[in-house]
Amino acid sequence: MIQPEQQRRAYLRALGIDVWVSRDQVDSPEVLATESADAASETLDWSGLRAAVRDCTRCALHKSRTQTVFGVGNEAADWLVVGEAPGAEEDRRGEPFVGRAGQLLDEMLRAVGMHRGDVFIANILKCRPPNNRDPAADEADACRAYLERQIELIQPKILLAVGRIAAQQLLATDTPVGKLRGRLHQYAGIPMVVTYHPAYLLRSPAQKRKAWQDLCLAMRVAKGQAA
Ligand code: URA
C-alpha cells in the first residue's frame, strides 16, 4: 500500500520539484522498493521501459491482468493522448482504446485530421482495474513513473488528457473535468488540454461540441498558434 507521503512526493516530482526524504523514510522497505523502481524507470529507453512495464508487479493489478497495456503510436508524436486505464477489450488485446470508446477517440482524432498512428496513446494505469473500477491511489502512484518516462521520451508538444481520471491525476486536483476543459494547463512544462472521455461522450453526445473545441485548442497549441 502506497502511503500518502509517497503520493505527495510523487506529485512534487511530477511538478519538477526536488524531493528530500528523511533517513527514517528512506530506510522503509516499501519506500526503497518504490523509489528504486521509480529511479530505474527514469533512465530507461523505449525497449527497457516496455520490458519494465511488461514485467511489472508494483501493485496488485498484476495478479488480475491478462497483459499490460503499454501504449501505442508514434514515439516521436506531437500529441500524447492520456486516458484512464485499460478496459476488458484493451486487457485482452494489449492496446489502449480499442473498444467502443476507442472507436470514438479515433473519430475525434480524424476530425482534426489525424490518425491514431500519428499520436501516442497511453493510460494512467498500464493494467486493467477489475470490473472497470476507478484506479486506486496506490495503483496510480505505482504506475506514475512509467507515464512520466513515456512523456520524457516522447517530448510531446501537447498532452491531451481524456476524462476525469487522467486530468485529475496529471494535475493533482479533484476539480471536475467540466471546469478543467476548454483552457490550457501545464504538466511538467508541457502544455496540456483536458477533454471529456469518449466513453462519457458516448453517453452524452451533446457534449461532443465541447470536445471538438478542446481538440481544436490542442491543435492550435501543437502548431504553436496558441499560448
Ligand atoms: N478507456 C481508457 O481510458 N483507456 C483505454 O485504454 C480504454 C478505455
Image: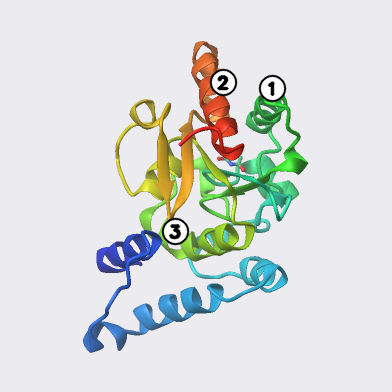
Ligand 1 contact, mark 2 (Cβ < 8 Å): no
Give the image's coloring scheme.
rainbow
Classify mark 3: helix, strand or loop.
helix
Classify mark 1: helix, strand or loop.
helix
Residue position marked by numbered label 2 in the rendering: 212
Side (left or right) of 68 relative to 58 = right
Residue position marked by numbered label 3 in the rendering: 139
Task: Determine contact: label 3, label 1, CB under 8 Å.
Answer: no
**Would you place residue 157 above or below residue 66 in this image?**
above
Instruction: State which quarter of the image contains the C terminus.
Output: top left
Residue 204 makes an appearance in the image: no
Q: Which comes sooner in the sequence, label 2 or label 3?
A: 3
Residue position marked by numbered label 1 in the rendering: 111
Task: Determine contact: label 2, label 1, CB under 8 Å.
Answer: yes
**Residue 87 location (% of width, % of height):** 60, 42
Q: Which comes sooner in the sequence, label 2 or label 1?
A: 1
Quadrant of the rendered image containing residue 141:
bottom left
Side (left or right) of 131 relative to 106 = left
Instruction: State which quarter of the image contains the N terminus.
Output: bottom left
